Image (spheres, helix red, strand yellow):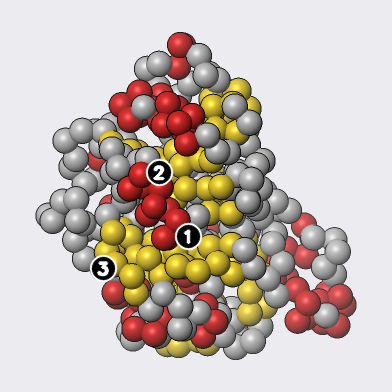
């Protein structure tokens, strides 16, 4: 099973630039991210803890300065401070940067002497669990709740794509590769699988009981709408389809869709333990799943050849949704046409203007 998202990691400050008209703050660059910080907190090449947007930070030092922004609560009752994309002095800021030394008392294995002697070895270390950081998820509406069988199955892959800002090496590593470019839809992800005769329905995090008591659940309604169980049984392989459920009642229905639909974005071969390549997926879509919409396809593109910088690819994904020309699209998802080490490479690029306007 894929690892949970790394929300708090040790990063190296790549560059620091001044902010016009600002005396007390400056802009720090970390991999593909940029984050406003108090002037003088960091130097180029110094280590910092970077907390990504969508992190829910615990209500304790050194995070208490965020209290004025208000608290958010998860469905499990956890309260904390949610990090969002914001603008300060006209400059985009995403996430939070704090000095690594602020957390030495929380991380006994990282005493000052160890940090000084092994500075490079700490870059990229995941502190999400150690610092009690959780991912913020909006409250689950009633129509998406249901009787739970267990957690998301270990033989499948979760659907959360990595953001391009965490993958700066991709610009050279996959410069000559073609990627399928699709619109990222703002809904709720779902997984339907058949594994050794067992049919299952999952949200992003949980596996539901297959019971009549869940019939009012939207995930189950989509199964009936598209006859997914029957279709998977007809194929006769250990397979799962994954897609985004969008429409009225889902994530504020920001695209203004008229009905709830499932849009397929990936098909996973459970026996091979990999996603199907685009040609393989297209063959299955044509033969078995033509009655289910696919997420809007924008084309095949050598994305890193055509948009060779972080700024250019972030600018590229701005635009209107194919499903509603009056609405901004959330961004784009990219899936490699070839496999690398037997895996399809995929990532997402989020429209920062969408984050500022809609989140």
Element type at mark 1: loop
Q: CA gap, disc 1 to disc 3?
A: 26 Å
Neighbours of disc 3 within 10 Å: few (<14), some (14-19), many (20+): some
Residue 103 position within the rendered picture, expressed as x and y whole percent measured from the top left: 72, 63
Q: Which residue is mark 2?
A: 243
Which residue, given by chain and number where applicable, does mark 3 sit on?
A: 318
Residue 288, image x, y percentages = 37, 40
**Real-space Cα distance between discs 3 and 2?**
22 Å
Q: CA distance from mark 1 to mark 2?
A: 16 Å
Binning the other alpha carbons within 10 Å of mark 2 as few (below 14), some (14 to 19) or many (20 upward) gives: many
In the visual, does 26 lie left or right of 125?
left
Does residue 174 appear anywhere in the picture? Answer: yes
Closer to the camera, 157 or 246? 157
| Secondary element at image label 2 | strand
The earlier-in-sequence mark between 3 and 2 is 2
Contact, mark 3 vs mark 2 (Cβ under 8 Å)? no
Placement of 52 over or under 323, stated as above or below: below
Q: Residue furthest top?
A: 212
Indicate which disc residue 255 carries: none
Residue 10 quadrant: bottom right
Check disc 1 and report the residue beneath it.
277
């Amino acid at each position: 099973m894929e690892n949970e998202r790394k929300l708090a990691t040790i990063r190296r400050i790549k560059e620091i630039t001044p902010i016009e008209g600002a005396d007390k703050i400056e802009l720090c660059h970390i991999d593909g991210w940029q984050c406003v910080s108090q002037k003088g907190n960091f130097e180029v090449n110094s280590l910092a803890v970077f907390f990504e947007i969508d992190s829910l930070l615990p209500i304790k030092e050194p995070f208490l300065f965020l209290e004025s922004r208000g608290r958010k609560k998860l469905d499990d009752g956890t309260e904390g401070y949610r990090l969002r994309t914001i603008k300060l002095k006209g400059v985009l800021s995403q996430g939070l940067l704090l000095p690594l030394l602020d957390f030495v008392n929380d991380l006994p294995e990282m005493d000052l002497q160890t940090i000084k002697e092994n500075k490079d070895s700490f870059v990229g270390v995941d502190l999400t669990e150690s610092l009690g950081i959780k991912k913020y998820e909006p409250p689950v509406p009633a129509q998406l709740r249901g009787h739970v069988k267990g957690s998301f199955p270990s033989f499948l892959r979760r659907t959360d794509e990595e953001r391009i800002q965490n993958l700066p090496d991709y610009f050279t590593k996959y410069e000559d590769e073609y990627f399928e470019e699709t619109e990222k839809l703002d809904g709720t992800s779902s997984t339907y699988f058949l594994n050794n005769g067992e049919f299952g329905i999952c949200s992003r995090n949980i596996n539901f009981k297959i019971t009549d008591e869940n019939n009012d659940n939207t995930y189950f309604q989509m199964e009936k709408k598209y006859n997914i169980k029957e279709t998977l049984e007809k194929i006769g392989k250990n397979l799962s389809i994954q897609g985004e459920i969008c429409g009225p009642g889902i994530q504020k229905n920001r695209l203004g869709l008229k009905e709830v639909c499932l849009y397929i974005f990936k098909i996973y071969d459970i026996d091979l333990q990999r996603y199907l390549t685009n040609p393989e997926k297209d063959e299955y879509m044509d033969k078995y799943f033509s009655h289910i919409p696919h997420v809007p396809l924008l084309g095949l593109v050598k994305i890193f050849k055509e948009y060779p910088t972080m700024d250019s690819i972030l600018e590229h994904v701005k635009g209107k949704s194919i499903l509603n020309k009056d609405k901004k699209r959330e961004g784009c998802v990219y899936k490699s046409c070839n496999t690398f080490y037997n895996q399809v490479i995929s990532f997402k690029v989020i429209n920062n203007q969408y984050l500022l306007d809609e989140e």
